[in-house]
Every structure is written in C-alpha cells, then in structure tokens.
Image (spheres, rainbow, N blue to C red):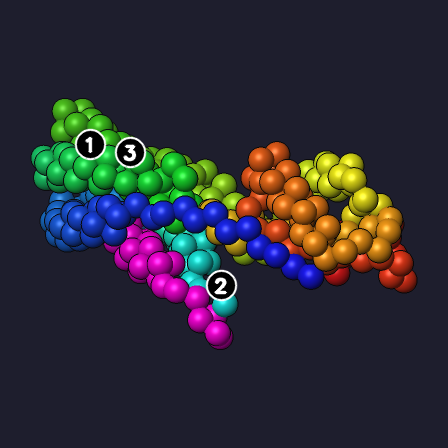
C-alpha cells in the first residue's frame, strides 16, 4: 500500500524570459568574437567565442528543458518531463568538459607557434563580451541558487565572463608589452577553469540520473527514526532517490508488530510523512505495510 505526499514548488515565471534574453546576447557575442578572432588572429578570442557558442547551445538546452519540465504527466509518462532539467544540466556540464579539452589542445599547439595579434580588436570585443555575459549572469543568478539546470547555464555564463576578463587582460598585455605568448596561456587557464567548474555539476547530475541517495540523507537515520513510531517493528527494503530539484522519494517495507486496521495504518503513514519531510526533506513517500510476511527483515537496502 502506498501513498504520496505532494508538495508543489512553483517555477519562476521569469526563468524562460531571462534565458531567452541570455540566448540572444550570447549569439551576438559569439558572432562578433568569431569574426574578430579571425581578423585579429587571437586564439584566446576564438576560444572565448567557442565557449560562448557552447553557452548558446547550453542556454537553448536549458530553455527547452525548462519548458518541458512544466508539461503535465500522462498515462505513459507518469512522471511527466520532470527529469528534463537534470538531463540538460548533465549535457551542459559534459559540453563544458569537451570544450575545455579542445581548448587545451589548441593552446598547446599555439605555444609552439606564437602569432602576432591585433590586440585593439581583442580588447574591444572582450569588453563587449564582459558586458553581455555580465548582464546574462545577473538575469539568471537567482534561479541558479535552487535549480540544477539553471545552475548549469549560470556556470557557462559565469566562466565565459571570467574568460572574457582574462582575454581583456591578455589584450592589454599584448598591446603595451607585445607578450603574445599570453594568448595561449590564457586559453589554457580558461580551459582548466572550465574543467574545474564543470566536474562538480557533471558529478551531481550523474548521481541524480543514477538514482543515488542524496548525499545529505543518511538511510540508517531514517530507518531508526521511523522504527521508533508506535506499532512499527522493522523498516527494510528502503529506496531513496531524487527525481529532480524539488522531489525526493522514499519507498520502504514497514513490518508491524500486530495486525493493524487500515485506518490505523493511515494515521501512522501520516506520522511517517510528517517526520521524513521535516527531518530529512523527503516529500514523496510510498510505504508497503507488512505483518508476519516471510521476507528478510534485516536487509535495509536491497534490489
């Protein structure tokens, strides 16, 4: 017998609009940097353009996922598209890593073949990118605090803004000191930073997709807590997973020390729901009641 406690978390109405504005800004930045990169010969500007292009793709993915996640469930999609934003976060984190590896390769090649660069164009275009990405970062910062999909888009934009700052510094050093080796060095640093930022998000989104128990939740503590409720003899066969940013699910077998009535079970179930919600943040509960059933009561976690 199962029961779900539903606690709705409303989506921000501004998410889609802010993502849309950020997409347009980044398309403008990307086009200008590609043209400027080829004209100036700056690898760091082209690498920043490539990162910006990955921003455009990531923002489009995030925008699509945000729209899909709002679709209602159906008989053949009982969870709806609630995982769309987690998949988007995974894809965006993975693209950060791929872009970073490509940039490292290009930077190493350029170290052995430094080229003269038209630094004035690099300076102006990097300033334009800083302003554009800075505005985008401010637009989605709030939503990024509690949504993995928006956080993946935010990370793309934040790292790109920082990369543009690095490109600006490089452009100034090349203009006044002719330090052309700074261009591949900055590209390498940008790439390493992308890996550093992308890895945690990739790991976090992978854990959700693999149905791992959230790291903030201790299974044994939950079992002990539920086990203290009156008439409960044992809690076993526990599964805890995170569906998306808003939903953590618990399912378990609960063995009772006497053959209780269904009305009694409903009261106990309400107690379990309140307890796991307030103590552990679990908002979807599915309990299978048992009395005298022949299965292993000592196995807490098992397929």
Q: Secondary structure at mark 1?
A: helix
Q: Position of residue 25 (x, y in %)?
A: 16, 47
Would you name the residue on which mark 1 appears? Answer: 168
Q: Which residues are magenta?
A: 55-77
Q: Which callout, 1 or 2, points at the residue further toward the start of the chain?
A: 2
Foreground residue among 281 and 110: 281
Front disc: 3 or 2: 2
Q: How many marks?
A: 3
Magenta stretch, main secondary structure class: helix
| Gap between marks 3 and 1 measured at Cα | 10 Å
> In the displayed structure, does residue 258 sit left or right of residue 199?
right
Q: Position of residue 233 (x, y in %)?
A: 84, 46
Front disc: 1 or 2: 2
Looking at the figure, which quarter contains the N terminus?
bottom right
Foreground residue among 113 and 208: 208
Q: Which callout, 3 or 1, points at the residue further toward the start of the chain?
A: 3
Check residue 162 in the rendering and tell me which mark sits there, or answer none. 3
Could one spot residue 170 in this view of the protein?
Answer: no
Q: Secondary structure at mark 2?
A: loop
Residue at image position (34%, 48%) is 11
Q: Secondary structure at mark 3?
A: helix
Would you name the residue on which mark 2 appears? Answer: 79
| Gap between marks 3 and 2 measured at Cα | 38 Å
């Amino acid at each position: 017998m199962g029961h779900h406690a539903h606690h709705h978390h409303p989506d921000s109405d501004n998410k889609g609009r802010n993502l849309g504005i950020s997409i347009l800004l980044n398309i403008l930045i990307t086009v200008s940097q590609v043209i400027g990169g080829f004209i100036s010969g700056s690898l760091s500007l082209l690498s920043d353009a490539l990162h910006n292009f990955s921003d455009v793709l990531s923002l489009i993915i995030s925008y699509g996922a945000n729209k899909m996640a709002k679709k209602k469930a159906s008989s053949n999609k009982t969870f709806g598209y609630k995982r769309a934003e987690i998949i988007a976060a995974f894809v965006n984190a993975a693209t950060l890593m791929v872009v970073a590896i490509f940039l490292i390769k290009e930077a190493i090649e350029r170290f052995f073949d430094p080229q003269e660069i038209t630094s004035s164009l690099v300076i102006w275009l990097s300033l334009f990118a800083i302003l554009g990405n800075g505005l985008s970062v401010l637009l989605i910062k709030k939503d990024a605090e509690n949504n993995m999909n928006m956080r993946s888009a935010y990370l793309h934009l934040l790292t790109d803004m920082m990369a543009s700052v690095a490109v600006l510094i490089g452009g100034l050093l090349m203009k006044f000191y002719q330090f052309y080796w700074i261009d591949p060095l900055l590209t390498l640093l940008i790439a390493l930073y992308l890996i550093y930022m992308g890895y945690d998000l990739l790991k976090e989104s992978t854990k959700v997709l693999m149905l791992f128990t959230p790291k903030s939740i201790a299974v044994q503590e939950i079992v002990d807590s539920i086990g203290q409720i009156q008439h409960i003899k044992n809690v076993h066969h526990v599964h805890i997973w995170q569906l998306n940013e808003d939903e953590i699910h618990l399912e378990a077998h609960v063995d009772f020390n006497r053959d209780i009535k269904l009305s009694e079970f409903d009261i106990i179930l309400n107690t379990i729901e309140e307890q796991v919600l307030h103590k552990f943040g679990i908002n979807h509960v599915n309990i299978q009641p048992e009395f005298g059933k022949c299965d292993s009561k000592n196995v807490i976690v098992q397929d």
